[in-house]
Image: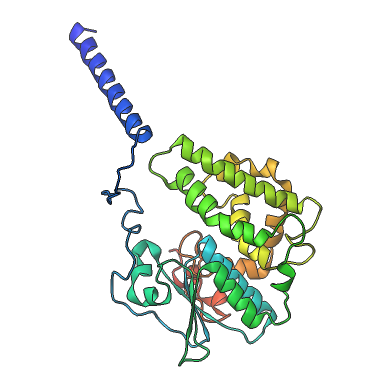
């Protein structure tokens, strides 16, 4: 190799090294300004995440014929509600509801009709139009579950039995922590963030594994469900996050990264047990817009839709 080639190679290496050093300093030496100003974002969530509330487009929400109108997407928080609605449908032969898809990737949650129901522009949101003159708006998945249980679970099958005895209130503990630590924390920094920051991944991995350990300890006495022998609202609230992650169907290879199979065997049994329930199988399909076509029921307006309106029926592969 000629001297000029060696010099060029060294220069390129030094340039690359300097660039990496600069990037490292920017990632690790960030000093917050006295007053934050919105940066120009290039990440995939940039258009979605804004520091202001309110509608960005004028568009009314669709309305179906049933009393319960759900506006959602098949995310874990959305699945909590659709699973519970299908559980109610399984024990109430005449119960029906309409589930309309809200495509958050297309910013449907910022349309004026949705913002009227949920000013915070987050799915899921529900409208109870039992009294058309006085509709009731409910948002946040936990609030929706409690509203539906209070209205329809008159025998306390799902709600009254969800008062766990033992180490704390499992429903409150996980409902308070799941979105911040597992979803917005671990899931974001481990799977979605364009730059992997070791401190951030470790910070939320500690919390996620601790919460898995709380669940595992609650189940280690052999109980089939979180509150004992009966399946309750506690399981419905928690399974779409922790159960689906335990089954390896969330955040890429996070199940392996968190060592869930070996470290939390009681959670694994619980996750499989709930996944086998028919209302859970059905509820997971509602408002789903990705994955295998047979698992997508984008809009649900009748029980028969599961047999006739999944994506493999509406748009079969050639």
Q: Residue furthest left?
A: 4
Image position of 190 (left or right of 272) = left
Lateral position of residue 15 relative to residue 178, left or right: left
Q: Quadrant of residue 19?
A: top left
In the shown orientation, is residue 194 left or right of residue 283? Answer: left
Colour scheme of the picture: rainbow
Q: Nearer the viewer, residue 146 or 290?
A: 146
The residue at 77%/57% (across/down) is 166
Q: Position of residue 5 (x, y in %)?
A: 21, 12
Q: Is residue 116 among what the camera can see? A: yes
Residue 25 percent coordinates (x, y): 33, 30
Q: How many marks?
A: 0
* Looking at the image, residue 52 lies above or below residue 114: above
Q: Who's the residue at 55% across and 73% down the image?
A: 144
Q: Quadrant of the C terminus?
A: bottom left
The residue positioned 31% from the left and 57% from the top of the image is 47
Query: Residue 275: in sight, yes or no?
Result: no
Q: Quadrant of the N terminus?
A: top left
Among the 4 quarters of the image, the one containing residue 284: bottom right
The residue positioned 57% from the left and 75% from the top of the image is 307
Q: Front-most of 116 and 282? A: 116
Residue 249: x and y in percent read: 56, 52
Q: Position of residue 85 (x, y in %)?
A: 60, 75
């Amino acid at each position: 190799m000629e001297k000029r080639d060696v010099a060029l190679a060294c220069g390129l290496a030094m340039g690359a090294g300097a660039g990496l050093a600069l990037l490292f300093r920017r990632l690790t030496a960030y000093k917050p300004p006295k007053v934050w100003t919105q940066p120009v974002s290039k990440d995939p969530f940039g258009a979605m995440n804004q520091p202001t509330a309110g509608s960005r487009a004028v568009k009314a929400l669709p309305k179906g014929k049933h009393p319960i109108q759900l506006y959602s997407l098949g995310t874990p928080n959305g699945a909590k509600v659709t699973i519970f609605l299908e559980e109610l449908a399984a024990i109430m032969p005449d119960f029906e509801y309409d589930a309309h898809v809200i495509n958050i990737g297309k910013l449907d949650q910022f349309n004026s009709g949705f913002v009227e129901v949920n000013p915070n522009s987050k799915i899921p949101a529900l409208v109870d139009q039992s009294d058309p003159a006085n509709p009731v708006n409910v948002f946040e998945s936990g609030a929706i579950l409690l509203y539906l249980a209070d209205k329809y679970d008159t025998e306390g099958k799902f709600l009254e039995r969800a008062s766990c005895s033992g180490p704390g209130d499992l429903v409150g503990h996980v409902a308070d922590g799941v979105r911040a630590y597992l979803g917005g924390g671990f899931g974001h920094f481990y799977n979605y963030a364009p730059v992997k920051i070791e401190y951030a991944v470790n910070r939320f991995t500690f919390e996620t594994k601790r919460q898995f350990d709380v669940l595992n300890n609650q189940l280690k006495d052999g109980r089939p469900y979180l509150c004992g022998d009966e399946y309750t609202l506690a399981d419905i609230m928690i399974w779409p996050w922790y159960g689906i992650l335990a089954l390896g169907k969330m955040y890429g290879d996070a199940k392996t990264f968190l060592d869930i199979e070996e470290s939390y065997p009681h959670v694994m049994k619980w996750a499989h047990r709930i996944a086998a329930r028919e209302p859970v199988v059905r509820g997971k399909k509602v408002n789903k817009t990705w994955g295998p076509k047979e698992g997508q029921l984008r809009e649900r307006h009748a029980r028969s839709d599961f047999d006739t309106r999944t994506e493999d029926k509406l748009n079969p592969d050639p």
